[in-house]
Amino acid sequence: MEFKKILNNRKNKKGFYFTLDALFALTMLLVVIALLPYTSISNIDEHYQMSYIQEDALQILSTIKTSDINSISINNIVNNSIYNETLYPNDVLIETLSKLWATNSSSWGVGGPGVSRIDNAAAIADSFFGSAIGPRDNFGIFFNNGSGVEPVFIRGNILFSNAEDIVSSQQFISGVYKGREISGYSARAFLQRKERINLFYFGGYIGDGNITATVDLSNVTNITNVTLELAINHPFDLSINNHSVGNYAGSSDPNFLTPVTISFPESSFNYFENGTNLIEFKNTSEMLAISGGYVKIAYKTPNPGYTVAQKQYFPGIEGVINLYDSMYSSNTITSMNARLHYKINVSADQNTTLSLRIGNTTIYVNQTRGSVNDFVRILTDSEISASLFANGGLTYANLSNKTVPVRLGFGEFAGSTGDGVADVIIVTDVSGSMAWSIGQDDSGAPNNFPASQCGNLSNPNNKIFWSNNSRMSLARCLDIEFATIILNISGNKIGLVAYEASPIRSYVNLTSNLTLIVNGSSGISGYTANGGTAICAGIRKARIMLQQQSNSSRRKFLVVMTDGLTNYQCNDVNNESLSVCSPDLCTYSNSYCRPNNGFGCLYYIFPVFNSLERRGEIFNLSLSISNIPNALVVGESNNKRGFNFSDGRWVNSSTYISGFTSKGYSATIFNLTGDGKLTIITSSFSSTSPLGYTWNGTGWSSASIVIGLPAAYAVGEVVYNFSNNGKFTLFAGNSSGFISSYTWNGTGWASNASIVNGIGDQGTNTFPAVAFNVTGDGNWTMIIGRTSSTSPVGFYWNGSAWKSKSAYVNGLSGAGDSNYAYTPDFEYNLTNNRWYILLGVSEYEPFFFAWDSGKWYKTCGDAVSNHAADQAISDAGKVAALTNFNKTYAIGFGPIEYCPFAQEEMKDIAETGNGEYLVSKNSTQLRDIMKKWAEDIASLSYAEQRTNLTGNFSSILYNDSYIEYHYDDCGGICDLRYDYLETLKKFGSTIIFESGYFNPATGLNNFSFQEGYPIEVAVTSYSGSKWSKWLGIDNNSINGTNFVTVYNLNEYGINYPTLGDPFRINIPLVNVGNNNTLNLTIANSSSEVHASGSDKIFYTLLTLSNYSYSNVTSNAAGCNWTIQYRDGTNDNNFVITPIPANYTGQDICYYSALVSGGCANGTNNVLQYDAIAQATYLLLRKYDVNPDNCIVDTKLSDYNINTILLPSVPFLFYTKANFVSWR
Amino acid sequence: MKSTIKNLIVKNKLSRNKRGQVWAIDLSISLVLFIGVIFLFYNFSISFAPEDPLVNKMIAEGGYASGALVSTGYPYNWSFATINQTYSFGLLDDRGFLDPMKLSNFSTWVGNTTVLNVANYSLSKRKINTKYNYYINFSDENLADIGWNFNGENPKQIVKIQRIILYNDTISDQSSYLVKPVKLNLYLWTNESA
């Protein structure tokens, strides 16, 4: 109420109203000002936004291809036929708009008349942007190339003319100009030498018989060189079109992997004709086969360009049609046809089958009975394509862009050709010792796994490889694997002989039946161990089987397996007899056995004392291996003998006892007195003094080297620098059981008890052997034999005393015979770099041990027969003498590894058959070698590509037989670039390069190029009678490792005889880089090797240098040229020719010094406006060293001037596209 | 002009005796003055007042953020990565087209106002080069919006950036695809003062 009163009072005051209004207004103003920051939720900086719109629009229109938009309304315009020569699908959208704008005046647009091309452009832009750019965006596209700015698209609610703020971006569009054509012409001109080199390749194997190769030549004006390189199996008569050229030798190697090279005499060049030429190879007595090669012909021609024949003629063959070849299409094949023209002469009741296979698919088979007269069979495209699909599921695409093997031959390639022809006899020892362990002789009861437990032999952990398994267990498994590998190739056969002393336990005749071999009643699985070892009988049986069951065309092989030395003799009077001499029954009364002084058939491989020597004098046996290699002297004075070591056995030789009076025990010393000679000291337990001798080269001479040595000591060993004392030290045994030692002081021996410290009494009649580092432990080693024990004892020297070490006699414990182990003597490297120890015993022969991995192994642990071994070798030789015998393989199981005699025996058996051998107690090593041998046999046995047809048979393949294939000229990419390259190939300059040879050790080769364009790259592969199997390329290095496969025979299967074999393997050009490494292998079904050392790479390059280019012009017709050129010193030579050759116009051009008013000229300014004329002119300038004189400095009569026209080349002018935003 | 004012004064003197007219004239004058002042202030503040540093900053960041979005992002194939493995949320594929998979991943991870994954949203700001709240939508209604819409949040400042990108409308069915440009609208907003 009070406020109202005041108000009423103030109403009465005049100025009050004004004040109140002012306050009210002021308040409102303040409120508005105060709220302003909060309410100005300002949006955008529109200027900033404008730049985004036009920049994004520019980006989009310059990115998206017109064809990618896929808008119906846009497509209706751009795909209209009126724009065929103007718009392209790959044009980006701004290009499309600009072209429509530029050609606006040429005709109406789509929807015309009345609808301009700019209308079309606007419609496209309008459709494209749709609602993405709205009226408020105020955006436009303008084109401008100097004739003013024209809008093509505008969208906005503000007139551009009213714009206060403008943001713009520009894009240059080349080749587009208002009112001009969109594209013109450019030409390239170049010189092409009128000479051409053609290579005509042979197939991988052409045989067998007289052969005719077809060489097509066209437009030949003059042949300049002809060379022939080919691998051929026999000498041959060479002729061209029935004109004899000469007689030439065949390849030098039996597998004809090495080609011969022949330069045709110049006089023979005239034998060639334009058109089809026949090069004939004849031999009247041998069937010829060519395993690759080529004819290289250089000739002059007016049409020297690169062309690829699409018709591939088969060679003529008169003999047995047996062709392994290939085909290659560098493009996608669209159709094929073939012509086979042949003749077959056989007896009336004989069946033949002639087949043609492409890849792994048979496309033609003719099964007939009796002869076939001159017969022509045309295979049509539909027939071939149907056969490819029906028989192999193939289409032409499967044969395109790669090398594909082609095979033409008889018998469906089975049975008559290509099968394995190996006859292999596996001779297996089934004697009693085969029950012993593989690792050690007579070692109790080893595992005896049946064949069913052989398992996977590729697994080295297979239990079958345990060293405590019986040898029979392993032999069964290895035999089975061996037979499986051989019989894996059809046609191969295996025979079995299981021998012991009976002598032949069982055998299986040659068969291809693996089941019979493995599980038959006499099969491998049934092998058990029992009886003696009559190797000669086993081999003899094998020979008889091969003689009776094989034939001369079959390749024969022998595999001999044994675990020990043979101890049964065969009848060497009757070589067909399988009787053997038992060691116990062998007597003088037997007509063929060779007894050995009452000891049956056994001939010992170590020296044996006769009865006189042995009688009560066994203690006197003394062995000392001298430094004269492999010599041995034994015995006392009246019973001394000398031996030398030969072929694993000791052979009597009196040389080593010449002048020598043996006292019984001996030790040799080299260079004792510094004279560089060998000396020997001999002594005995008797009271006589020792004797000394020096070897004089032919015998022993007495030497004063025993001063200080007492009597009654058995000289055991003399060593140098014992315990680093720098002296000779002598160790001697005696009857008391102690060991004595003496040190050489330069003139005599001085006793030195410290050196035998620690040994003590070792029994009766001790005899020491001393050597350094026998077991590899770096210690001096002493082994003492004695007559008081059958076990020697071992010691090592610790620097001050000898310490007992039983490990040194591991394997020697109880090694003596029933009485004792005596007179040990070390010898290093008798064979195989091993330490050996000879141990004298009380019976006939000493024992011989070899140190291996911590143990002494008895080397030849059975009673053996020298003569029996010789017989086995002799019988093996008789096998090797069989016709078409290939190899003998000998394998020894178990510890005979340590027996030099056994090794020699196996080696000799193998060598008779030019084969290989191995003796080992290592099961996996044995398996590996058996497997390798099997694979080798499979390889060697293979008939490969030679034919085996015999009997009344002949055939002719006429050289008018062929395969023809057509392909898409563009390879599916008919664009400008492709056409351009094809034109270049035809009219450009190509050069054929040859690489060096493939490395036969690695199969690698390389080539590289920096200039030019490869148009053909091919590898030539001399595979002999094998197949070129695999070719890889690494196109990124000349030391490549990452290979891409470009040819793989296995792609077509592994039954190689049914497959063709390329000599030339083409490499698809997409796989070729500037630096390339290639890797090539050849193979048959069972083995693979690197490329031969005669293989190389041919690569054809299109050279791109010395070309000229014209500018882009609106015309490209050509001109009639008169060109002056220099030939030597003569300047007045002229070529008058239209360029291009088909030019029919009236324009005339000169390049000549004789033209007045300038040396180069053309009517109607043709050099300026005609692309071809201009390019020609520029080329001539390039070959004119001094352009001022206008005389070309190249003998133009040797060249063609060729030109290539490039249509649809964009001009160099441009238009600016402006993308504008405004407000 | 002088006479006009003089006439007004005379008229004013003549009307002093009319109470109602005095108030109306004052009010009219004050309104005219008021509106005039407001108009002048507005023009002054827009044209002559120093630019708001916050707006400038947001516009600049809008440029960075939209540039990031109109790229492939990093890694370029982040649509196969996790959010933590993604450093930059570019929405284009290597042809420059909107990548629907990237858009889907972005939308799934961040969400929008309806269901916003706050943690990922916060994380995503750095991956599009801004510290402000953002919201993205497209001119094509089939494309999902992403981020926190400012509607109802009473922001103190908003910046809007528009970009044009290519969108393959039916990417899953190439037989009937249509490539067209669409607008990407990026809003940066904040409740904070400069």
Image: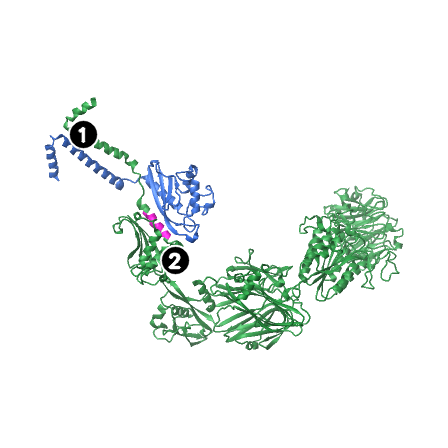
Chain colours: A green, B blue
- The chain letter for the residue carrying disc 1 is A
Q: Position of residue A1145 (x, y in %)?
A: 37, 73
Q: Residues within 10 Å of mark 1 (few under 14, many from 20)?
A: few
Q: Position of residue A104 (x, y in %)?
A: 31, 60
Mark 1 is on which residue type?
Thr
Judged from the image, the secondary structure of the residue bearing numbered disc 1 is helix
Quadrant of residue A945 in the image? bottom right
Task: Confirm or deny contact between disc 1 and disc 2 (CB under 8 A).
Answer: no
On the picture, is A357 further left or further right than A46? right
Residue underneath mark 1: A19
Q: From where the camera sits, is residue A353 visible? A: yes
Give the residue at x 20% y 35%.
Answer: B31
Tell me the mark number nearer the camera, choosing from 1 and 2: 2
On the picture, is A1175 further left or further right than A650? left
Judged from the image, the secondary structure of the residue bearing numbered disc 2 is loop
Q: Position of residue A810 (x, y in %)?
A: 77, 45
Q: In this figure, what is the number of numbered marks?
A: 2
Q: Position of residue B150 (x, y in %)?
A: 35, 38
Query: Looking at the image, is mark 1 or mark 2 earlier in the sequence?
Result: 1
Residue underneath mark 2: A91
- The chain letter for the residue carrying disc 2 is A
User: Bounds of the magenta span?
Assistant: A50-60
**Quick check: A672 above or below A1166?**
above
Mark 2 is on which residue type?
Asp
